[in-house]
Image: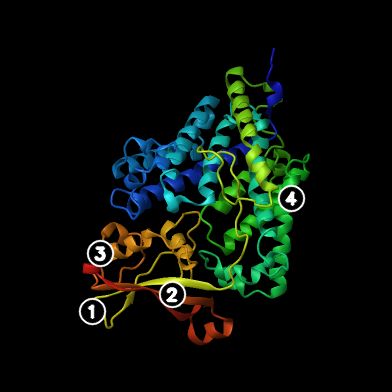
Amino acid sequence: MDWFGWLGTGDYGFAREVLQRGVAAVFVIAFLSAADQFPALLGEHGLMPVRRFLQLSYARRQPTIFRWRYSDRMLRAIAVGGAVVGGALVAGLPQLTQPWLTTVLFLLMWGAYLSIVNVGQTFYGFGWESLLCEAGFTVAWLGSSTTATPVTVLFLIRWLVFRLEFGAGMIKLRGGREWKDLTALYYHHETQPMPGPLSRQAHLLPKWVHRGEVVGNHFAQLVCPFFLFAPQPIASVAAAVMIVTQLWLIVTGNFAWLNWISVVLLFAGVSDGAVHAVVPVWPAATGPGTDAGMPAWFAVPVLLASALLVYLSWWPLRNLFSSRQLMNASFNRWHLVNAYGAFGTVTRTRDEVVVEGTEDVTGAGGWREYEFHGKPGDPARVPRWFAPYHLRLDWLMWFLALGAHDRWFEVLLVRLLHADRATLRLLRVDPFAGRRPAFVRARVFRYRFATRAEHRETGLVWIREDRGLLVPPMTYRAGG
């Protein structure tokens, strides 16, 4: 007798392909980012060394393989190994075998990345880190092409998207007045953490378009998420509307993999029938149907994992309707079933910290700027697209300009005085070509996008105004 036939469906074969390959692709990017940036930021000689962090009792309680030992070589080995596993899943090779293999591989990536996040400190303190961990754990239970798609897992992924979108919408309603009077997008394209090449064009759109953007955002985040749980094709339509809003954010911003993984996860609400209506070459139903059943040895762990996620849902559910709603919070050490949200308030002006150095031993002149990859610097430089890659130092520089000072910035300046190679590799331009400067300093500038007339006249993308020193000139001797 087939006791678990009800657990599987054959109507979401395309969704499973997108979910597994898409989440695996984000893992690949995240692991490669860690291999590239983690040692300089948090490694043995990083700005915030993991070994020092692990001396804290809080850190020793976190689930991470690095509790017993950390080395940059070990970090890179784990990151490269995770990227290789993710690459195999992107290619779809494990999905052709027994379902336990895809589950094991996704859980390995989840555990490896969880180990990195839990020692990443402020450089990994972003909501999309927890989002990737939760997505990886949940998608792990989707099985392979040899079995039906578990309906409980599909609904749990929709529940994840609901918290992601509805949580962000509620944060905005409880946040700044600009979301209520529809003026938030007057400023957001200009003041967002890392603008993209089309952000200026978006900022210069008429104000009635910006008000429409806010209305569309509220509809996508506060209304559409409920319809993800509606019958088809309503759920597919709701998912499609939300995908369009995420694509607009991808085009106009640079939010690491947040919007990309959101698009992937939204396919949990898209049925094969809906895909067939848009792309007729895709069958209306694919993969094993519900009549194929599901082997008990796989169904039982799926139900246990589903029950665990349902149990853990109480805390984020309560948070959604709390007047003191938390944003981007984890309620357990495993980063499962988290609270999400972003931009409860929108800053109306943009300040940037510009780091400069000089080889003049008197410090009287000859100051030249260090250029970062993503954050605004040279006023004539058009912002680049980097998402879904995450430039962690650039993001922290945005928070620094908002007043979130931390010791990592002092260490960064000292490393620049030493012309530390690992640190310089995090930057786009070292104005001294590897030589030690005599002094470094940090200044604050107020940035705004150039109007069309200003751009035609000067060729500048940004207009900036000097707001004074953040850190006065410091020398190699003063820095140690």
Q: Secondary structure at mark 1?
A: loop
Question: Which picture quadrant has residue 115?
Answer: top left
In the displayed structure image, the side of residue 438 where residue 396 appears, left or right:
right
Q: Secondary structure at mark 4?
A: helix
Out of 414 and 29, give the one closest to the viewer: 414
Q: Earlier in the sequence, mark 4 or mark 3?
A: 4
Q: Amino acid at mark 1?
A: Asp
- Alpha carbon separation for disc pair 1 and 2: 21 Å
Q: Earlier in the sequence, mark 1 or mark 4?
A: 4
- Alpha carbon separation for disc pair 3 and 1: 16 Å
Q: Nearer the viewer, mark 4 or mark 2?
A: 2
Say above or below: 252 vs 109.
below
Q: Earlier in the sequence, mark 3 or mark 2?
A: 3
Q: Are marks 4 and 2 in contact (CB under 8 Å)?
A: no
Q: Amino acid at mark 2?
A: Val
Q: Amino acid at mark 3?
A: Ala
Q: Nearer the viewer, mark 1 or mark 4?
A: 1
Mark on residue 419?
3
What is the x, y in percent for residue 435?
A: 22, 68
What is the x, y in percent for residue 421?
A: 26, 59
Mark on residue 224?
4
